[in-house]
Amino acid sequence: MQGTTAERVSAEGLKHAIENRDARRLASLYADDAEVRMIDRNNPPSHPRVVSGRAAIATYWDDICSRAITHAVDFAVTEGDRLAFTQSCAYPDGTKVFCIATVELGDGRIARQTLVQAWDE
Amino acid sequence: MKLPQTRYARSGDLRIAYQAVGQGPIDLVFVPGFLSNIDLHWEDPGYAHMLRRLSGFTRLIQLDKRGTGLSDGVDPVHLPDLATCTDDVRAVMDAAGSGRAALLGASEGAPLSLLFAATHPERLRALVLYGGYACFHRWVQDSEAVERFVTQAETSWGQGRTLRNFAPGRSVDPELQAGWARFERLSCSPTAAIALARMNAAIDLRAILPRIRVPTLILHRRHDARVNPEAASYLARHIPGAALRWLEGRDHLIWTGDTDAVVDAIEEFLTGTTPSTMPERSLAALLALRVTGASRRALLDAELAERMAGFDARLSNEARCFGGSVMASGPEGRLLRFDGPSRALACAQILNDLARSLGIGLGQGVHVGEVLPGESAAYGSIARIALALAGQAASGIVLVSTVAAEVAFGAGQHFATWGEVRIDGAFVAVERLVPEQHLGRARRVPRRDPELAPLTQREREVLALVAEGLSNHEIAGRLELSAHTVKRHVANILLKLDLPSRAAAAALLARSEGA
C-alpha cells in the first residue's frame, strides 16, 4: 500500500478529484492490480478497452486530465463496497460527453471500474 | 459516410479548420504533408481506413495547415514561416481543449512537428514522424527539382501532374492520377502550391534535433520513393532516445500501401499494447494482362509502346463498363480489380478483341481472393497469382484459377481444364476460358464478319457512317468526337482493311452486311 493517506475511496473524494482534474490523486485511489474497462462507440461490449494496473491507469488519467474540459460528477450512489456515478464533460469547442461508471472496491481502493461513455459527434 | 464536424480555430487573424474524431483517452494531432483537405481525406478508401483506425484508440484531431484545404488562404507575397504554422497547431489544440497531445507529422508535416516539439515540449505527450526529414534539399529534392515542380504547378496545377513527385511509378495509373488531380484542386490554388513548395524547400531543422526531449517514434518505409530513407536514420541518430521503425514498401504517402502496418506501429508506441484488430478485408477478382513474349519479339520496342499507349487509352473505360478499375500499370503488365470473376471474365473478352485489333498479343489471368483496403492488393499474393497466370497464357487466352472459375459458376462462362501452375511454392489449379460456347455474355458483342474482324467497336461505328456517305465533320458531330479523332479512325480502318479509299471501305461493309 502506498503512503499513509490510504483513506477509503468515497463518492465525495472521487467527485473532488475528477472535477479538479487531479490526475495524481485519481491514480492513488486505485489498487496496484486494478482494472478499468471502457465501453464506447469504438470499444463495444464484446471488446471493451481494458487498462490494467495502476501505472497504466495513471497514464490514462494523465491523458484525460491534460484536456481543458470541465467535469461534473452530478450523481453518485454508494452501497457497501460498490459505487456508481455519472459524469458530464464539456470541451471548449462545445463537444459534450456523458459517462456512467460503476466501481468495485477492495480494501478501500478501486479494484475494478467499468465506464460507458457517449460523445457528441 | 457521415463526415465529422469541421470546426475552426482562430490563429492570429486566420482560421484553421480541424476535425476531432474518436473517443480514446489520448489526443493525437495529425499534421498532414504538403497537400490536405480534411473533408476529402474521408473520400479516399485508404485515407479513411487509416483515420478510422487511428481514431479507434485516440481522439484524433486532424487539421489543414494555413493555405491548404478548408483553412484560410495565405498571402503568397508574405509567406508564413514554419514557426507561424506551429502556432496554428497550438491554436487547434487550444480550441479542441487538448492540453497535451501526441503529434503525428507525415512528410512535410514532420518538420513542422519537430519544430513544435522543440518549442512547445510541455504540450506534447509523444512525437511520431512518418516519411519525415530535417533538411529538404538534402533528402527530398535539390533546387533544380524544386524549380521543375514550380514550373509544373504553374502550367498544369489541378491536372494531377505533380503525383510523380510524391508517388513515382504510380503516376501511370489513370484512376490515381484523376484522384490526385482533384486532391490538388481542393487542397490549394496553384499560387499557394508554389508558395508552399518554396517554403518547404527552405526547411533545414538539423540544428534543433538534439533539443527535442519528447518520446519520439520515427516511421519510414524502407524504399520510400520521395524522401530518402537516410533522412529517417539521421533523425534517429540526432533526436535523443528516438526509436526508428522501418516499414516495408516504397509508398511515401501515409494513406497508401499497407496503412495497417503504420497504424499498428503508432498504436503500440502510444498505448504500449499490440493491436489485435482484424484488418478489414474484402473479396475481389483481379484480372492481370501481359503482353506475350512472342508479341514482344515480333514488334520493335517503339511499335509496341505506341500500340500499348492506344490500348491503355481505352483500358480504364472498358474496365469501368464492368464496374472495375485499373489498380496498377507497369512493365510487369496491367492489373484490374472487379467485384467478381464473371465481370472480370467478360471484360477480359472485350480486352482480347481490343488487343487483337491493335495487333498486340495479350495473355490474361484471373484470380479471386481477399484483399486489404487501399491499393495494397496490387502487391498481395492474389495479384501475384493473377500475374503469373497471365504470364503463362498464350495470345488471346484467358487463364482462370479453378477457385475463380468456381465462384463464377452459373454466370454463363465455360471453362476447360488447363493444368497447374506453381506459384510461391504452391500449386494452383488452372482452367482456360472457352469464350465461344456460351450464349449470354455480360455485354453482347455483335457477330463479326471475318473481314471486318480487325476493327474495334468504335471503328465499326465510324465505318457505318462512312458508308452512309457522311463527311468526317458530320461523323464527328454524330459520335460526339473531334474531327481529328474521326480522321484517325478512318485512316486506321483503311490501314487495317488494306483498302485505298473510303468508298472501298463502304463497299466492303455493304458486301459483308449483304452476306
Image (spheres, rainbow, N blue to C red):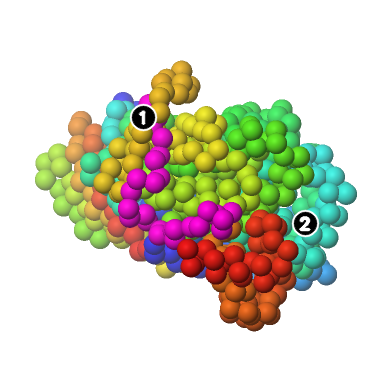
Indicate the secondary structure of the residue bearing disc 1. strand
Q: Residue at x 23, y 41 (%)?
A: A46
Q: Is B320 colored magenta in this rendering? A: no
Tell me if B74 is positioned left or right of B413 in this view: right
Instruction: Kindly identify the amino acid type of the residue bearing the numbered disc 1.
Output: Thr
Residue B184 is situated, as x and y percent measured from the top left of the image, at 65, 62
* CA separation in Å, label 2 and label 1: 57 Å
Q: Residue at x 36, y 34 (%)?
A: B416
Q: Is B448 colored magenta in this rendering? A: yes
The range drawn in magenta is B428-454
Q: Is residue B5 visible?
A: yes
Q: Residue at x 36, y 48 (%)?
A: B342
Q: Residue at x 73, y 36 (%)?
A: B228
Position of residue B313 relative to residue B141, above or below, is below
Q: What's the mark number on residue B417?
A: 1
Per the image, the residue denoted by label 2 is: B197
